Image (tube, rainbow, N blue to C red):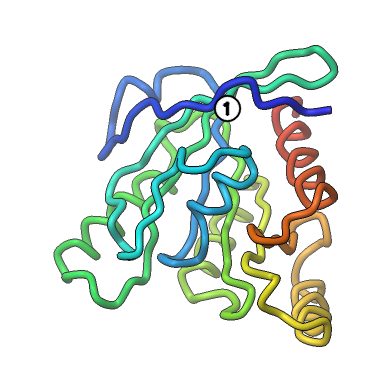
Amino acid sequence: MIVIKEAKFVKGILGSNEILEIKKKQVAFWGKSNSGKSSFINSILGRVNLVKSSSKPGKTTEINFFDIFLEKNKKEENIFFVDLPGYGYAKLSDKLKIKIQKLLNWYLEGKEVFERLNILIVDSRRGLTEFDKILLSSFKEKKEDFLIILSKSDKLNQKQKSQIFQTMKKEFSEENFLFYSVLKNKDKEKNLFWQKIFSFIHS
């Protein structure tokens, strides 16, 4: 059984920072604005508003670090959750879009980043964006593990879900994608997510 002992915000960064010198594994959350990224993180941690979500996409412009303390089978673990700014929101100013893109590219290059597991949040109704595909190609090139969360799956009927599953299966291993609904989350989906996390922690 997994117990989340503590989850707390540490700091937001805009580039090189002493927090990156801490040799602690990072779980990085990527996603298009309004993909449900903040809601997913809160849901998987069992918290209501640890990660602030907004009705105005694109509001987060920093890389936010959260200290996560876990316990499994009486053994404690400590990792960082890293919430990255959402991308692809059309109404942002060009200046802010460029700023966010530069920040994402800097973190993606990972020269100052300790070991990382990438979690890509994708609105299951919308599918992968072009930038999502660029990210996935980069993860594969860097040989970094990743998991695609197909969010808002409660908005799909069974036929749609089956079609999306078959499409994803053509390109990805089943262990690399997972349907998830914040409104109707089930223990099975949560357990699959945490299995991925603990596999990464002990890799």
- In the rendered image, residue 8, in percent from the top left (x then y), is placed at 46, 26
Q: Quadrant of residue 55?
A: bottom left
Say whether residue 127 is left or right of residue 196.
left
Say whether residue 62 is left or right of residue 37.
left
Q: How many marks?
A: 1
Front in this rendered view, residue 61 or 99: 61
- In the rendered image, residue 32, in percent from the top left (x then y), is placed at 45, 66
- In the rendered image, residue 7, in percent from the top left (x then y), is placed at 53, 27
- In the rendered image, residue 138, in percent from the top left (x then y), is placed at 54, 57
Say whether residue 128 is left or right of residue 146.
left
Q: Residues within 10 Å of mark 1 (few under 14, many from 20)?
A: some
Front in this rendered view, residue 46 or 139: 46
Q: Quadrant of residue 92?
A: bottom left
Residue, disc 1: 25
Front in this rendered view, residue 144 or 49: 49
Quarter of the figure with the C terminus: top right
At horizontal 36% and vertical 53% (from top left) the residue drawn is 85
Image vertical order of residue 125 relative to residue 191, above or below: below
At horizontal 41% and vertical 29% (from top left) the residue drawn is 9
Image vertical order of residue 15 relative to residue 99, above or below: above
Image vertical order of residue 17 relative to residue 51, above or below: above
At horizontal 28% and vertical 57% (from top left) the residue drawn is 59
Front in this rendered view, residue 160 or 53: 53
Image vertical order of residue 93 relative to residue 25, above or below: below
Label 1 amino acid?
Lys
Say whether residue 16 is left or right of residue 118.
left
Quarter of the figure with the N terminus: top right
What secondary structure is marked by label 1? loop
